[in-house]
Amino acid sequence: MEKKATYTCIIIDDEPIAIRVIQSYLDKLDGFVVVGAFTNALDALKIFHAQAVDLLFLDIQMPGINGMEFFRTINHPPKVIFTTAFRNYAADAFDLDALDYLVKPIPFDRFLKAINKFLDQKAAESIQEHKAENNEFIIVKSDKKNHKLKIADILYIESLDDYIKIHLQNKSLVCYLRLNAIEEQLNNTLFTRIHRSFIVNIRHVSAFSHYQVEIAGKRIPVGRKFKDETIKRLNEVGDKT
């Protein structure tokens, strides 16, 4: 019976035996399919351009290009588990939001622990998406009336000190509410804080850089402290579209 392709995986390691070990471990698990295994990291680039990848097993010290350097070149990187014979790269790996850091030789029980981290993250994402689907509307008060707004229709929200301005496609509403208070009512699947004065609906962003995003022709600044998370969230949206 053919294995169900739930999660796609890529293995990159300059040692063929290391690839075989990881492949054999994945073969014991349901729902994990290896769509590519490479001894040369640059040969794997075509896979990332051709299809979505859920999980990457990546060696660090390889000829030609360091695994971490290679990972930084991927525009929309998947979850990554670094697999290496060296312990001294762990801090750098987790700076890259690595899911885990496995030191060779890798025992199966330690490998399974890393897989469980991956599955826990995917389950949490699924729960959050489900919550977002079931929280479609929000009630806000503006101009002495209660307005029922479809959350997906909100473009962005702007802080005006003790007030907020909710921007929709054809109108805007000013409400006596702080930005932090409205942020708590929104689901973080659709919305992200990009500036101390702005929350945006990431589904409506048409263009972005490290300094600004564009929604419905409006350019909105990205605050320095929000820059990395903003770029990460917007790239994640690109992966799903």
Image: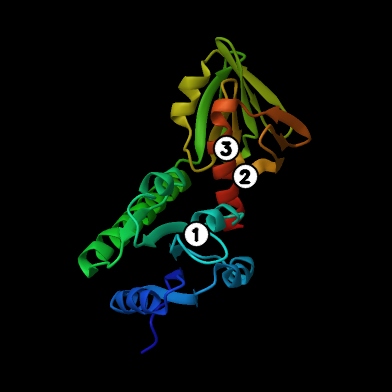
Going from N to C along the chain, the mark reached first, 3 or 1, is 1
Residue furthest out toward the top: 162
Q: Residues within 10 Å of mark 1 (few under 14, many from 20)?
A: many
- CA separation in Å, label 3 and label 1: 25 Å
- Discs 2/1, front: 1
Is 152 placed left or right of 110 in the picture?
right
The circle on residue 203 is: 2
Residue 176, quarter of the rendered image: top right
Q: Amino acid at mark 2?
A: Arg
Of the pair 174 and 58, the residue shown nearer to us: 58
Q: Is residue 150 visible?
A: no
Circle 2 SS class:
helix
Task: Name the residue: 43% across, 45% down.
Answer: 92
Of the pair 124 and 150, the residue shown nearer to us: 124
Percent position (x, y) of residue 86? Answer: 35, 57
Q: Are marks 3 and 1 in contact (CB under 8 Å)?
A: no
Is 183 placed left or right of 86 in the picture?
right
Residue 154, quarter of the rendered image: top right
The circle on residue 230 is: 3
Percent position (x, y) of residue 13? Answer: 45, 70
Percent position (x, y) of residue 213? Answer: 69, 35
- CA separation in Å, label 3 and label 2: 13 Å
Which residue carries the number 1 mark? 67
Q: How is the image coloured?
A: rainbow
